Image (spheres, rainbow, N blue to C red):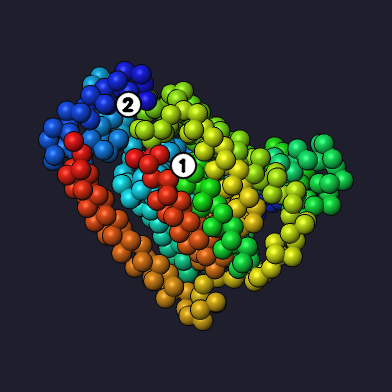
């Protein structure tokens, strides 16, 4: 999001609030972005169903070419295991979790690490072409930068513990295991969504 | 030709890593296009204002599931050679609860935090750094909680086998469930938009 657009969005939202029918429109950031474009290159986000079907085809392609699905936490686990191996090789080789993430024999030889590098490249290219690259902290309207970053770091660390225990995250368990009809993956989806709704309800003031 | 292609990914061969890079680029592209590199948009799912997460995830799951079902039926892919994440009942329920709680605080999941970081979002970079620390810390204590970590192991267990029903039946049920969820998501979004219209000054 460009600086100019950021200035325009609150003004548009304020204008839209005068008209109750337009309020719903103002809340949808993608449509506001489209309105705010006004000669800029900022595009609205894609239709969620279209993006979902495309994501499903990427997942299917991964099954067909590599015999495995998508992942994210596995790449972090390999990076963590490699870090421990550099510092304390004995600890890494004796740890059943870390040892299984050293099988590839090198960070850049690990399938998921290379895949995640691809995610970074793909995400950057998509945002660059849509005019959505911006150095900023995304947060709720009533949240300041410091609490947002503390919640981000703490939430990330808690997710890390959950992903170790569940042996995967929203990519490797929910998407991949979900499409393969894995029992554990569907239990993970139900547990994660349930807990997220509870925590989001308790902390709702920070996002709305 | 029977898929999966004979790319020996475990050994980190050049063709398999090229495949990994291509799959990753397309994955990151889809997440960014859907708006899932944006934490407030992603959290709209959990504050009931924007159901993008549900729409993207379930249409992706349904698409890949039906694709696998038909490719297998046509004899194009050998499902016995596709890696199914193993099931560990207790750890995956407990891990899911911990993961979901962390996700609602972080506003992003691990994959989307990488997209957020790549597009310049410093909150995404912080989530990714926190996630790395969490995986490292939890990974180090796995040996001390090994009894629970290894509990409830069922191997590669799929819903049709667990429920004793045909794969086609489960596939149909997932599609029907997804369509019902999409209809419900639309109703919730409209109801919340109407409510917001009344509450806003």
Chain letter belonging to callout 2: A
- Secondary structure of residue under mark 1: loop
Q: CA distance from mark 1 to mark 2?
A: 23 Å
Name the spot of residue A178 as percent of width and height, x first.
Answer: 50, 61
Instruction: Tell me the quadrant of the picture where the C terminus of chain A can be found.
Output: top left
Q: Is any part of residue A148 visible from this angle?
A: yes
Identify the residue under disc 1. Answer: B107
- Secondary structure of residue under mark 2: loop
Identify the residue under disc 2. Answer: A42
Q: Residue at x 60, y 68 (%)?
A: B89
- Residues flagged by tags 1 and 2 on a common chain: no
The one of B65 and B115 positioned closer to us in this rendering: B115
Name the spot of residue A56 as percent of width and height, x first.
Answer: 44, 52
Q: Residue at x 17, y 32 (%)?
A: A16
Name the spot of residue A103 as percent of width and height, x first.
Answer: 76, 49
Circle number at residue B74? none
Q: Residue furthest right?
A: A90
Name the spot of residue B72 as percent of width and height, x first.
Answer: 50, 66
């Amino acid at each position: 999001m460009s600086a100019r657009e950021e200035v325009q969005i609150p003004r548009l939202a304020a204008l839209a609030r005068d008209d109750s029918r337009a309020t719903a429109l103002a809340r949808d950031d993608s449509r506001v972005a489209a309105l705010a474009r006004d000669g800029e290159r900022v595009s609205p986000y894609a239709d969620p169903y279209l993006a979902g079907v495309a994501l499903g085809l990427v997942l299917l392609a991964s099954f067909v070419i590599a015999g495995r699905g998508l992942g994210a936490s596995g790449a972090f686990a390999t990076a963590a295991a490699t870090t421990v191996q550099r510092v304390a090789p004995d600890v890494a080789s004796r740890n059943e979790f870390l040892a299984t993430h050293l099988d590839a024999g090198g960070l850049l030889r690990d399938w998921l690490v290379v895949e995640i590098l691809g995610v970074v490249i793909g995400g950057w290219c998509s945002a660059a072409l849509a005019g959505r690259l911006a150095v900023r902290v995304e947060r709720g309207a009533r949240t300041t930068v410091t609490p947002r970053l503390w919640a981000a770091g703490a939430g990330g660390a808690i997710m890390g513990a959950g992903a170790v225990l569940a042996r995967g995250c929203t990519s490797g368990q929910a998407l991949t295991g979900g499409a393969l009809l894995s029992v554990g993956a569907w239990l993970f989806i139900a547990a994660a969504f349930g807990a997220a709704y509870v925590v989001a309800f308790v902390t709702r003031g920070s996002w709305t | 030709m029977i898929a999966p292609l004979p790319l020996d990914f475990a050994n980190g061969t050049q063709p398999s890593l090229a495949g990994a890079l291509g799959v990753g680029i397309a994955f990151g592209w889809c997440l960014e296009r859907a708006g899932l590199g944006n934490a407030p948009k992603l959290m709209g799912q959990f504050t009931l204002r924007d159901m993008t997460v549900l729409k993207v995830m379930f249409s992706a799951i349904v698409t890949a599931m039906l694709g696998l079902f038909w490719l297998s039926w046509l004899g194009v892919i050998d499902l016995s050679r596709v890696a199914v994440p193993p099931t560990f009942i207790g750890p995956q329920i407990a891990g899911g609860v911990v993961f979901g709680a962390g996700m609602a605080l972080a506003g992003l999941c691990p994959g989307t935090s990488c997209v957020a970081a790549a597009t310049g979002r410093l909150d995404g970079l912080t989530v990714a750094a926190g996630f790395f620390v969490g995986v490292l810390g939890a990974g180090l204590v796995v040996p001390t909680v090994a009894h629970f970590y290894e509990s409830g192991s069922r191997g590669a267990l799929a819903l049709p086998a667990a429920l004793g029903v045909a794969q086609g039946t489960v596939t149909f049920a997932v599609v029907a469930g997804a369509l019902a969820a999409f209809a419900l998501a639309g109703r919730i979004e409209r109801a919340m938009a109407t409510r917001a219209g009344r509450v806003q000054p």
